[in-house]
Image: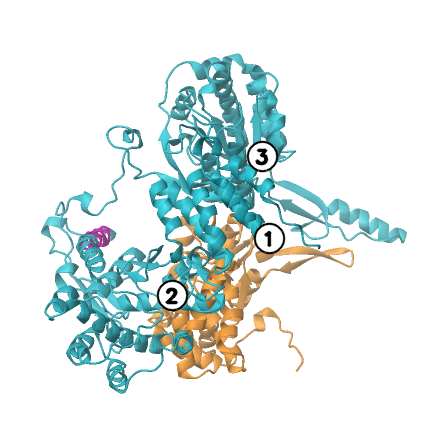
Chain colours: A orange, B cyan
Amino acid sequence: MQARVLESEAYFIKAEPYYETTGDEIAIFEAAYQNKLPVLLKGPTGCGKTRFMEYMAWRLQRPLITVSCHDDLTAADLVGRYLVKGGETTWVDGPLARAVRAGAICYLDEIVEARKDTMVVIHPLADDRRVLPMEKLGTIIEAEQHFCLAVSYNPGYQSVLKDLKQSTRQRFVALEFNYPSPELERKIVEAESKVDQAMAEKLVKFAHMTRNLKGSGLEEGASTRLLVHAGKLIASGIAPVSACRSAIAEAVTDDVEMLAAVQELSSSLF
Amino acid sequence: MAEQLPYNAQHIEPLLAEWLDVEFTFYPVAQLAADIAQRPRAEQDFLLDWTRRIATTNREIAYRFASRAGELLARMDWRMIEAWARKSMDTYDQAGLRPALLVIDNVDNYAQTDQAHVDGALYEDIDTILLTFARGLSGRALKLAQGEAVYTDSQTLHLPAVIAKMETVADNFLLAKAMVAFMWAQTRFGGFRPDLAQRLAAYPDPAQALQVFSSLEALRIEACLARELPGLHREMQRLKTLRGEHQLTAAWAALAQQLAQPNAGVEDSLRLLEQASTLEPAPHFCFQGELRLDAVMQVMNARIEREKVLLRIKLAELAEEARQAQPDAAPRETQSPPQFELKPEDEEVAGAGEMELTLDGAPIAPPDDVKQLLTSIQLDLGQIPDEYLVAAGPGEYDPSLYQPQEKDPNEVWQGTYHEEGAELYDEWDFGRQHYRKNWCVMREKNVTPVYDDFVAQTRDKYAGLVKHLRRSFEAMRDENKLFKRQAQGDEVDIDALIEALADANDGSEMSDRLFTRMHRAERNIAVMFMVDMSGSTKGWINDAERESLILLCEALQALGDRYAIYGFSGQTRKRCELYRIKTIDEPYNDEVRARISGIRPQDYTRMGFAIRHITKLLNAVEARTKLLITISDGKPDDYFDIYRGQYGIEDTRQALVEAKRSGVNAFCITIDQEARDYLPHMYGAAHYTIIDDVRRLPLKVADIYRRLTT
């Protein structure tokens, strides 16, 4: 199959993404959307924030434009810039400007990774003005009525340098995400990776063991995403202990002793 | 490689005589030398090396070691002998000669088998992995310790120095892991919940009842592990088969089956006790620990008491937080007391399953420490009794019951000596080629601020220099720069574009570097200065140090780097002191200036602990570059102590190696003219500067810092 090339505004999610609701987050998101309020998703990595966005984009039938933020992301990367084409300069919209024009859902993933000065460009969009000033063009775009801004961040990285400013965070409706309950997580692993129930249960148990280690040497326990990865490997015939090593243990730590200990945990379980 | 020839007794005897100081101790080394002389060279090297290393610690231990070790070489793994030797020295450090000699005498702890050359697993090799393993298993945060037997007091899991029941290292490690899991399961599956001592006392022979009960519990816990950790359980079966413990008599097998029911609890073991007492004793599994009920009771009772208080106080804090979160809340007096409730999250998982905590009917997410407490209480009592969920009233408990007591470091030497509140650091013993564990007792102390005109005087004295330093340090501030002619960037570089178009019109090649990019730079340096406060700095040197610190602070203030200043001094390992002058995030204010002014020479120059502690502090700071700069006047030294001379140099070197390994760059500024003899060895060739004239120190330090960081 050939890879499809789409304009980012045209990226509609056609098939329903698999998503298990854990509370009233769908209702809250919808209400925020109807009222044109921006949304902030908090939660550890791999607990389903991005999947939730895909699900909501599908549900609301809006294109989804995702920007993964990094520490070199500048305002121009979001808004747009002049490029040189054939001896002339032409303006090219950035992803945020495209979403504002097209009325898409713009999802800024891991917003704290972006530099602080970048974050202010979203401020006029994130309050009742809903406009994007394009300084270099000297124009202002009023957001299309269906435009929606969502950002995510992981409060677990407890670093003073990487915290959201109050002026930014107080513009959003916040939804907290966490690892699902064991029962639900088992269901998710089962559905996503096609392993049987007993295996999914063990994977979840293993994840809880690694989450117990948070604070005694691990920065973060195994996420639901990693469990799904491990499950998929197991479903393709890899032995559970090696699958857990490659998909989970090696992914959460580089520390040799920690790896050995996590390995002992998984070999005890399977 | 050719086999080397063994030494003869004439060669060995003087060596032993020297190491063991025979001139004064009169040990009969001739016989020893003759014995060693008959051994192959490899054995000789091993024995002599360890005898020499131990002799640097204590000659008596070394002599006894040398007398015992020879005959052990044939039947014990050499790694075990090394572990035994190290243990004896650690014991000597901690408890003195007599207990250390006991370790030497009880070598059988290390030779737990009569089979020749078994590859045992050493506690010190496996403890970190097994501790992490135990922590991962859920439940209470357990501890691991070396003890003389396998047992748990429900808080600490004890393992012996060597686990050597199996034949290979891998199997012995597995056995140790099984022991840890077994002891974990004892608390996890409620093995200590009933008052066992009292229940067993009702039997005519309580000791025998304890044995039988322990066998029944072993069967029950094994079944629990089979459900909980099937992978480990399989390995445990294999170990049992290897040890020939897998066969149960029919009667015991029937009991085992009853205890393997998923709902079987400790009460079932007690119920079957009568019946089991009439049977032949069941085999003692290799991974099964001893039941030490008095240890369990003692720890458990203290913990239950403390955790009840702690939980109720934490709940009161939670309720108070929740109350403050509501702006329109009525004053506390008029409100009904907070109502806490616990509900199981899903019904099917009872016991230690997930619980939901509610306050006045609304669910709240308890912080991690409260969750830990709830889990721990549940493990002890099987549930959370209602009276535990009543928030403590104000002043209901004395804070000393639940708060760790911090003792004032200044009071350490008044009354009886204590080590509470101090941090312990290892020290490298080069003679032993090993660390002395928890050897240095380190405390952080405050410098008494002195508000005098020293700072003003210094600023006046060096007015020109201060101005110059400020200017040159400000210039180092890495500011945002606009980079032109970049291949990628935010904006079009019009000059570059016009040039490129002109080039294109000419027919020459057009550049693609047409953009400008804003370069935003952060210096992101954290630096800690470690200032010598030993007695030898008295006078000129102390003045120069204080002056340099003032100048340095003025300069760093202009630069904006984060920095801390600590003074170090000490007298013997029991009194290692680090003086806080400025912590990393403290602003440079009048108090800091007064503390700099208040730096006074203290005692001696023990350096290892200071480097280790500051490295630890630096590693807690988030910064791209971490720098540790020592300002010193001489080599490491301590009062009437082996720290003088090579020992101190080697320990300092080792501490610096550790620092380097953890990502801290070390540099030394010294005024000791003889420093060329030892500093390159300690810091490395390029990591030190010697200043010829003390008076030039203030002029130099800031300058050196600038060179170091650009």
Position of residue B238 relative to residue B402, above or below, is below
Which is nearer the eye, A164 or A190?
A190
Mark 1–mark 3 Cα distance, whole angstroms, equals 32 Å
**Residue to which mark 3 is pinned:** B682
Provide the residue span drawn in magenta: B311-324
Position of the N terminus of chain B, as image quadrant, is: bottom right
Tag 3, which chain?
A: B
Position of residue B32 relative to residue B582, above or below, is below
Instruction: Locate residue A16, reporting x and y percent.
Output: 47, 80
User: Does residue B399 appear to the left or right of B656 in the view shown?
Assistant: left
Instruction: Locate residue B475, reporting x and y percent.
Output: 61, 30
The label shown at residue A178 is 2
Callout 1 and callout 2 share a chain: no
Can residue B313 be seen in the rendering of this structure?
Answer: yes
Tag 1, which chain?
A: B
Amino acid at the residue labelled 3: Met
Tag 2, which chain?
A: A
Q: Of tags 1 and 2, which is closer to the observer? A: 1
Position of the C terminus of chain B, as image quadrant, is: top right
Callout 1 and callout 3 share a chain: yes
Label 1 element class: helix
Instruction: Locate residue B689, reporting x and y percent.
Output: 61, 27
**Residue to which mark 1 is pinned:** B42
Amino acid at the residue labelled 1: Ala
